[in-house]
């Protein structure tokens, strides 16, 4: 039995692929919506996201998990960290799937940074209306920063109750919350940046739709702050489905009929 950490469209596709090859796949996700999509992908069971590493260890033991596949966002979050630590404790193989990095254009309007805190400082110095396309993770870093005082912060997040509630609790106004699910084309991004009169766009280097956001911003001559992804520790980092399947077969063998 293997566990997939859900967090991207690719996670659902990987669940379907592994299930089609005869492997029994469980999943866990940080949100109820993610859990629903994982189930639609073919997961035989969706586990509640653990509160800490200890709970993750207990869940892996209880469910007889023999391999963990991390297919969360290219910028690994808490779920990814807990699963890696739990796998290390139990000496389970851990595979990390990531999209290939976006080839960033060489342009004076593209500002690459290495942390959320640096992104806040740079963005605050580039404009008064900051459009965040980074989702709800680390949103508080922007909202609570002194550098953002007097700035308008527009955030694009998933249309989930938990996330909208978080935005509300952080003091964001409804007019500044764009609740939509992507991915979006460059044309759609451009129209949205124009509609909200963005003066600077913030995104993460996450592959996928990152290029469309950058092209849209540069097309409007807007500066873009790109948060570089942090390389994950350890080995077994793969970028395509074939490599995932090869590693699963290597560790688990061919599934029983």
Image: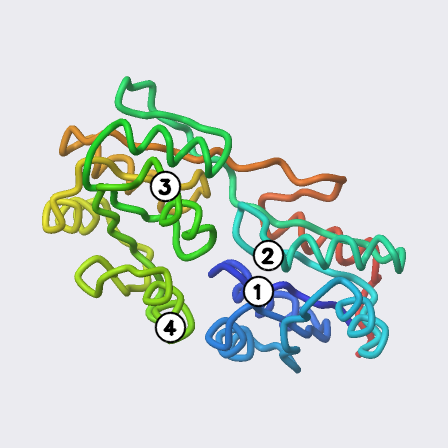
Label drawn at residue 126: none
Label drawn at residue 203: 3
Residue placed most toward the observer, 140 or 25: 140
Is the residue under label 2 in contact with that under label 3 (CB below 8 Å)? no
Mark 4: secondary structure: loop
Q: CA distance from mark 3 to mark 2?
A: 19 Å
The x, y position of residue 245, in whole percent, is: 69, 56
Of the two numbered discs 3 and 1 in the rendering, the one whose residue sits closer to the viewer? 3
Q: 12 above or below 133? A: below
Q: Quadrant of the N terminus?
A: bottom right
> Toward which corner of the image does residue 249 lie, by quadrant?
bottom right
Mark 3: secondary structure: strand
The x, y position of residue 104, in whole percent, is: 38, 27
The x, y position of residue 172, in whole percent, is: 28, 59
Q: How many marks?
A: 4
Mark 1: secondary structure: strand
Q: CA distance from mark 4 to mark 3?
A: 20 Å
Precedes in sequence: disc 4 or disc 3: 4
Could you tell whether 211 is left or right of 101 in the image?
Answer: left
Label drawn at residue 160: 4
* Pointer 2 residue: 71
Q: Quadrant of the C terminus?
A: bottom right
Is the residue under label 2 in contact with that under label 1 (CB below 8 Å)? yes
* Pointer 1 residue: 6
Q: Residue at x 33, y 56 (%)?
A: 183
Residue placed most toward the observer, 241 or 95: 95
The x, y position of residue 223, in whole percent, is: 24, 29
Is the residue under label 1 in contact with that under label 3 (CB below 8 Å)? no
Q: CA distance from mark 1 to mark 2?
A: 6 Å
């Amino acid at each position: 039995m293997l566990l997939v950490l859900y967090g991207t469209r690719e996670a659902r596709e990987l669940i379907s692929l592994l299930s089609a090859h005869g492997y029994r796949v469980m999943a866990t996700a940080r949100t109820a919506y993610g859990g629903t999509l994982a189930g639609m992908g073919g997961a035989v069971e969706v586990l509640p996201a653990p509160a800490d590493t200890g709970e993750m260890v207990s869940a892996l033991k209880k469910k007889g998990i023999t391999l963990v596949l991390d297919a969360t966002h290219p910028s690994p979050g808490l779920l990814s960290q807990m699963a890696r630590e739990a796998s290390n404790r139990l000496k389970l193989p851990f595979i990390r799937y990531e999209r290939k990095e976006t080839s960033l254009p060489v342009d004076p309007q593209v500002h690459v940074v290495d942390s959320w805190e640096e992104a806040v400082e740079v963005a605050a110095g580039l404009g008064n209306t900051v459009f965040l396309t980074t989702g709800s993770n680390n949103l508080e870093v922007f909202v609570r920063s002194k550098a953002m005082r007097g700035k308008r912060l527009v955030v694009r997040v998933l249309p989930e109750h938990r996330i909208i509630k978080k935005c509300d609790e952080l003091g964001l106004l409804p007019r500044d919350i764009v609740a939509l699910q992507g991915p979006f084309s460059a044309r759609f991004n451009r129209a949205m940046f124009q509609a909200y009169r963005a003066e600077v766009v913030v995104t993460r280097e996450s592959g996928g739709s990152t290029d469309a956001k950058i092209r849209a911003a540069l097309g409007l001559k807007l500066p873009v702050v790109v948060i570089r992804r942090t390389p994950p520790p350890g080995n077994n980092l793969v970028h395509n489905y074939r490599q995932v399947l090869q590693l699963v077969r290597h560790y688990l063998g061919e599934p029983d009929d």
